[in-house]
Each structure stands twice: as C-alpha cells, then as structure tokens.
Image: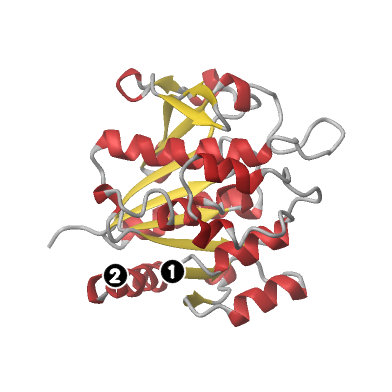
Amino acid sequence: MEKKKILFISQETHPFLPKSEISENALLSPQLAQSEGKEIRAFMPRYGCINERRHQLHEVIRLSGQNLSIDDQDYPLIIKVASVSSARMQVYFIDNDEFFKRRFVTEDADGKPFKDNDERSMFFCRGVLETVKKLGWRPDVIHCHGWFTAIMALYIKGTYAKDPHFAGTKVVYSLYNDSFDTKWDKRFAEKLKFEGFESDILDGITDTSCLGITKLISSHVDGLIMASETVSSELQQIYDSATCHKLPYEGEEKNAKTLSEFFDKVIEDSVLA
C-alpha cells in the first residue's frame, strides 16, 4: 500500500528558530507522522535571522529560479534545504531577498508587525506549492502551523483547486495561542483577485485581523487541531463551531497514532467524496 503523504508547513521550526510552542510542534508533528509510516516533507520561510552556516543550509538549484507574481510584481523563488539529523528529516526553506532577508521573523525590532506580512505569507504558500510540484510529490494532507501559513487553505480551495497535482489534497490547520495585532493590508482581497481568486472566496474577506483571517480559513480547512492548551474565547468559539474534523488538545501526551489516524480520517473523506 502506498504511503500517505503529509506536507508540514510552519512559520517557525526548531532548531532553526528558538523553541516555542509552534516551533517545537512543527518539528514533532512530522516525526510522529513518520513514525506511523507516513511520508513527510517540511517547509518554513528562510528568515534572515537563521544562521545558514551553523545549520548547513544549501540552495537546491534545480528547484530555484522560478518567479512568483505578487500584486503585479515578480519575485524570484529560492529554495534551500537542511537536515535535522536527530529527527531524521529534511526541512525545505522558501527564500527571497525582498521578503525574508530582514533579520526578524514577523515583527521588526520594535515589535511592530511587518506591513507586508500578507504578501510574505502569499509568497511562502505559493512557493511551497510550486516547489512540491517541481518535486513531483503530491501531498494528501497539508498540515499548517502558525497564522503565517493559514491562507494555504485558500490557495488549495481557490486558485489551485483545479490543478491536478493537488486533486484531493486536504488542509489541516493547528490553532495556537498566537496572533498578530495589526490588520493586514486592506488590499489583501484585491491582491488575491489579481492571482485569479473568484468571488466565492473573495467575498468572505471582510476582516483582515488575525481573528478575521482565522474565521475565514476555518470554513475552508478540512481539519482543525487545538494546539494550545488555552486560547482566547474567540478562537475557542471558532474551533467549537467548525464543522470540519477536529482534534482536541493533547499536550505532552501527544500520541503518534492519534495524529496519524486523524490524518487518515481527513484523507478518507477525500476518497469518499
């Protein structure tokens, strides 16, 4: 039987960034899935604060070189890779000087969110999808960690919905007690329209706050995982009212079999559809 393929994408992953709830989960989840016989790939952005020499990142020339158009501007896509020997896995990095050269993750030195985080997220999600196409690797599930990855669900249900490479691909999103304070650019919907998104998704973009984006994608994902023990009442309400598959918080007792079976359940819906 062919192994199920799970694509993990995260806004941060340990050990390339400091330990946090997201970065540790982004490392652990692929390990758990792999231990249950799943085939995995993992991606994150190549922020300027990541020490390439220490972590032995190197560019994958055959995957780099493509230009992605964001808001009518072309940006070169650079792909790098590094190994996490202790986890027996590789992590691919989406890189571009305009979006990721700065030496911070999603906020500047004063703690203010970058004004172009919407475009950085768009470039990252599209970069991941274009790269796995070049790899010839078709994911059954895309598991997203962190709000920076949330709009992957919009791409899979929107502009990539008719791409045969992603036929049947499902999206699972982990909810964390993590957010951004400044709304995304009010032109966010307009930027997506330029990429070919249609009104069935665009009409739902009325609030570009973190909570608004989370509400939006909760109606497009195929599975939600409660990744933090405690979240805001608003996030809890989104989780409780969601009609997709849901996996409650497990904490340190996170079970490989439980996660693997959750992915199987989400995939099975695709088979039956």
Residue at the outermost left position = 1
Residue displayed at 70% across by 25% down? 103
Identity, as a three-letter code, of the amino acid under mark 1: Asp
Q: Secondary structure at mark 2?
A: helix
Residue 178 appears anywhere in the view:
no
Identify the mark at residue 270; answer none if there is no mark: 2
Left or right side of 50 for 245: left
- The percent position of residue 110, horizontal first and vertical second, equals 87, 33
Quadrant (top left, top right, bottom left, bottom right) of the C terminus:
bottom left
- The percent position of residue 226, horizontal first and vertical second, equals 58, 70
The crowd level at tag 2 (other Cα within 10 Å; few <14, some 14-19, many 20+) is some
* Nearer to the camera, 253 or 246: 246
- The percent position of residue 42, horizontal first and vertical second, equals 42, 44
The crowd level at tag 1 (other Cα within 10 Å; few <14, some 14-19, many 20+) is many
Residue at the outermost front position = 199
In the figure, 126 relative to 180: above or below? Answer: above
Quadrant (top left, top right, bottom left, bottom right) of the N terminus:
bottom left
Identity, as a three-letter code, of the amino acid under mark 2: Ser
Identify the mark at residue 222; answer none if there is no mark: 1
In the rendered image, which quarter is residue 171 located in? bottom left
Of pointers 2 and 1, the one earlier in the residue sequence: 1
* Nearer to the camera, 201 or 226: 201
Left or right side of 186 for 12: left
Residue displayed at 80% across by 48% down? 182
